[in-house]
Amino acid sequence: MLVAGVDLGGTAVNYTLLNDREEFLIEGLCEHPARSTEGPEICLKQIADGLKLAVEKAGVSLADVAVVGLDTPGPASATGVLSAKGSTNFVHKDWASFDMCGNLSKVLGKPVVYLNDANAAALWGHFALFGSSSGTTSISCVVGTGHGGGIIMDGNVIKGRKGFGGELGHVLIPFHMIPGTEGLTPECNCGRTGDLESLCSLTSIRRHLLPHFLKKYPDHELGKIEDPHKAAYKVRGMAEKGDPMCRDIFRVEARALGLFFDQMVNTFDPDALIVGGGVVEVSPEFLSWFMDEIRIGMGPQREEQADIPIHVMPNGDTAGARGAAIDALRHARESGQLAATK
């Protein structure tokens, strides 16, 4: 018997299938349009249609799927009820306070379990490193348009009282310690000033870091681009090629990650730190430089903790779906769903 992992994004749904021997039946991307901007009714039908295509691609039957694991962007409760303001990337008004698990379960006729997308990716990163063994702890940061994260302790996702555990992007950091941030007041969309997302995300580049550094590089070519979104998208590629200003921007992002990881090292003493998202989907040379800058940002560590590794999130494009599938498999085993369907 199988479980499915469904990673619902703003524009696409990604699927994977996992059997009870912890083997994935779909290796690469298996996507279907999400149409989330058109509201829940259309989007849930898209999820169901895409799942049918996914099981056909894997050469199995939909009847073989015992439990479906779902992940979406937050904020949402631990049981998959979206915030009263809706999800970050779902603009349709009907997503407000929408019960993702309950409603998708009705559409599919199967049990559905939920993780937010960053926690799902973190679970996959942990599983890829340590397998299903317990007793290990990892901290994951996924840097994209925003900044997601996840804490896996003893092999379990830390969800917290209301489901907002692992919202690592909104942890405040002492950013004034980072060279080059003098005079910077980074405000996050969540309303906080100086949290990790406000300094380490594509949004932070567009809203804060690029305008800040253009004052130091007034003749830079990015200053001639009127659309701030287009200018921000160009920063990573130019940083890879060695552009001094763009390297300065990514140095701030790396040092911010380093300060945050230092807090996590002294809070959890983890077995591994993991970085995912666009910041690691780069050339080997730039990735090595970025990782070194993270280490510098962490500062000197205790001798006993200096060997904590920093890993790149494996299978970045499919990490969310894989993590959702792993969560579904655990639920199926604990609830007896797999045994009941044989």
Image (cartoon, rainbow, N blue to C red):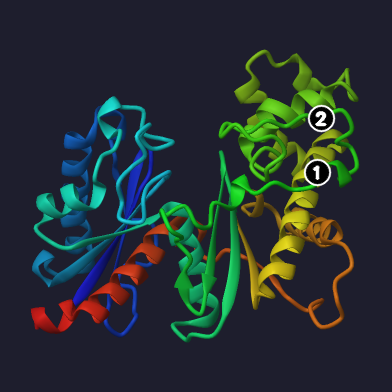
Q: Mark number for residue 67?
A: none
Q: Is residue 33 left or right of residue 125?
A: left
Instruction: Please identify the quarter of the rendering in which residue 114 is found.
Output: bottom left
Q: Are marks 1 and 2 in contact (CB under 8 Å)?
A: yes
Q: Is residue 136 left or right of residue 244?
A: left
The amino acid type, in three-letter code, at marker 1 is Phe
| Residue under the image location 60 percent in, 47 percent down | 169
- Label 1: which secondary element: helix
* Residue 3 or residue 28, whichever sits in front: 3
Dividing the image into 4 quarters, which one contains the N terminus? Answer: bottom left
Question: Which quadrant of the figure contains the C terminus?
Answer: bottom left
Residue 173 versus residue 57 in the image, above or below: above
Q: What's the residue at 72%, 39% (across, down)?
A: 194
Relative to residue 188, is residue 241 depicted above or below?
below
Please name the residue that numbered disc 1 is placed on. 175
- The answer to whether residue 180 is visible is yes
Q: Nearer the viewer, residue 2 or 90?
A: 90
Does 306 sit above or below residue 97? below
Disc 2 residue type? Leu
The residue identified by callout 2 is: 184
Image location of residue 137, percent across then percent down: 58, 76
Residue 160, image x, y percentages: 46, 60
Say if residue 277 shows up in the picture: no
Label 1 CA crowd tier, 10 Å (few <14, some 14–19, many 20+): many
Res. 98 image quadrant: top left
